[in-house]
Each structure stands twice: as structure tokens, then as C-alpha cells.
Amino acid sequence: MTYPQNAIPQPQAAGTALSNRRLLSLVTTSLGGYLLLSSLTGQVTQVLSGAEYMRNLGFAFGLLLTLNLLFALAVALLGLFFATASLARRGIAAGIVTLAVILIAIFQAVRFSMGFGAATTFIAFTFADPYVMLPMAFGAAWFVVRYRPALAFVALALVVIVALAHWALLTFGADTATSSLVMLLLGATVTAAIGWGGAIASRLFGGNRAPVSAESSPTAQQYAQPQQAPAIYSQQNDRPAERGPVI
């Protein structure tokens, strides 16, 4: 009796599994980024700054906003850990995003509580602006897990467009709804452009994408092992008296 040939795992399945994992990482990370943006552009930083009118809303409301922020961060980090990079690179990427969220929260809390003096306007549209910091942080984190060359990080300078656009919208009196919608679309476009910029730099300057390790992808390890066809069974080979070398 022989086994069907399609019962033996095919090497193409490894590539399909890795592609699906990269897609899962991209989708989950993008969802986490959107949730973080929605949370950080809301009232959570005003809760952390101890604004008087936020204290009047009660402890439960502030706790809810804080939990929303933590959940959004967890989704983003989960997406990065779905990536096919090594554990060290995924940890670095997670650290970049976490640090960016902490900095945004701190700068916004100080801005709402005491301000930065003459530098308040500059801080408001740079370090305290989620529309600027999150695309830069997620772009850098994605470059790390995708093994992009160092020159790809130049694409992060595109966030200057976001900062200038946000400043222009608020300076010329755009309403909150219009400003939020324009900045959401612009931020998503710039983030995608940063990602494509890293991909182009990787192609032009020799992408240093390391081979996927067994630690980051058990599926690759499974299919990397040489596959041997199972031995053919017959009644003749099963009889001890006639057992001999099998050709």
C-alpha cells in the first residue's frame, strides 16, 4: 500500500504560512494604531493631567478611558509580535511604540496642565501630537521587524507634512470634525508612504531581510526539514522468512 503523494507536506506551504503571518501582523498593527490614535486624540490625556472638569466626571469615566488606551496599545503590540522577525527585533519594535505612547501622554498632560511656555505651540504639533508621533513610531517599528536598511528611516521625515497640515488647519480655523477627518486620512496616507519608502529603499540598496529563524516561525522549521516518503508496505516484506533488503 502506498501513501498518496499529496500527504507529504509541500515546501510551498511554508511560504504561504509566512505570507499569511505577515498579513496578519500588518492588519493587527494597523488596527492597533487606529485605536491608539482614537484614544490619544480623545480625553484620556486630560484625565491623566488632572483637568478639573475631567475630575468632575468621576473616577469610573477616567478609568474607562485609561483602559481603552491600554487595550489599544495591547492590540498594536500583538500585531508587532505576529511579525516574522526575531524575538529581539519584535521586542525593540514594541518598545518603540510603547515609548511613543508614553511620550505623547506625558507631553499632552504637561501641555494641558502647565504648558511649555514659548515652546508650547511647537510641542503641541510635534511631540504632543498623536498624528505626528504615531506614524513615526509605527513606521520605525515596522522597519525593524521587516529588516529594512538604515537608509529607509529617512522616510520618517514625511511626518513633517502631517505636522504642518495640522498646524495650518487649526491656525485657519477649521472645525474639529473637519480637522479630525483630514488628519486621519492624511496620517494614514503618510504612514503608508513611509512603509512603501522603506520597501523601495530595501530594493534599491539591497534589502537586508534576514532569513526567518525557527524561533520566529515554527512553521518554517517544520517545512525546512527534508521530507522523506514513507516506506512502501507489502505482504512480502512483512514475512520474516522472506524479509530481505528493500530496493
Image (cartoon, rainbow, N blue to C red):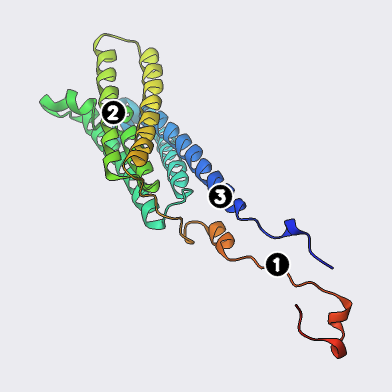
Q: Residue furthest front?
A: 247
Residue 123 appears in the picture as rendered: yes
How many residues crowd mark 3 within 10 Å: few (<14), some (14–19), many (20+)? few
Where residue 245 appears, x then y in whole percent? 76, 84
Q: CA distance from mark 1 to mark 2?
A: 53 Å
* Relative vertical location of residue 197 with respect to residue 16 in this rendering, above or below: above
- Residue 22 in percent (x, y) is at 50, 44
Where's the N terminus, which quadrant?
A: bottom right
Q: Secondary structure at mark 3?
A: helix
Q: According to the image, label 1 marks what residue?
A: 229
Q: Residue at x 39, y 33 (%)?
A: 196
- Mark 3 vs mark 2, foreground winner is 3
Left/right of residue 147 with respect to residue 118 in the rendered view? right
Nearer the observer, 74 or 149:
149
Q: Amino acid at mark 1?
A: Ala
The answer to whether one can see residue 129 in this image is no
Foreground label between 1 and 2: 1
Q: What residue does disc 3 label? A: 15
Q: Amino acid at mark 2?
A: Leu
Residue 49 rendering spot, x and y as whole percentages: 27, 34
> Which of pointers 3 and 1 lies earlier in the amino acid sequence?
3
Which amino acid, mark 3?
Answer: Gly
* Residue at x 49%, y 43% (from the top left corner): 25
Sooner in the amino-acid sequence: mark 3 or mark 2? 3
Say if 208 sits above or below 243 in the image: above
| Residue 27, above or below 82 | above
* x and y, in percent, of residue 35 in the image: 44, 33
Disc 1 crowd, CA 10 A, few/some/many (<14, 14-19, 20+): few
Q: Does residue 197 sit above or below 207 in this rendering?
A: above
Query: Marks 3 and 1, how far apart in space?
Result: 21 Å
The residue wearing badge 2 is 158
Residue 77 quadrant: top left
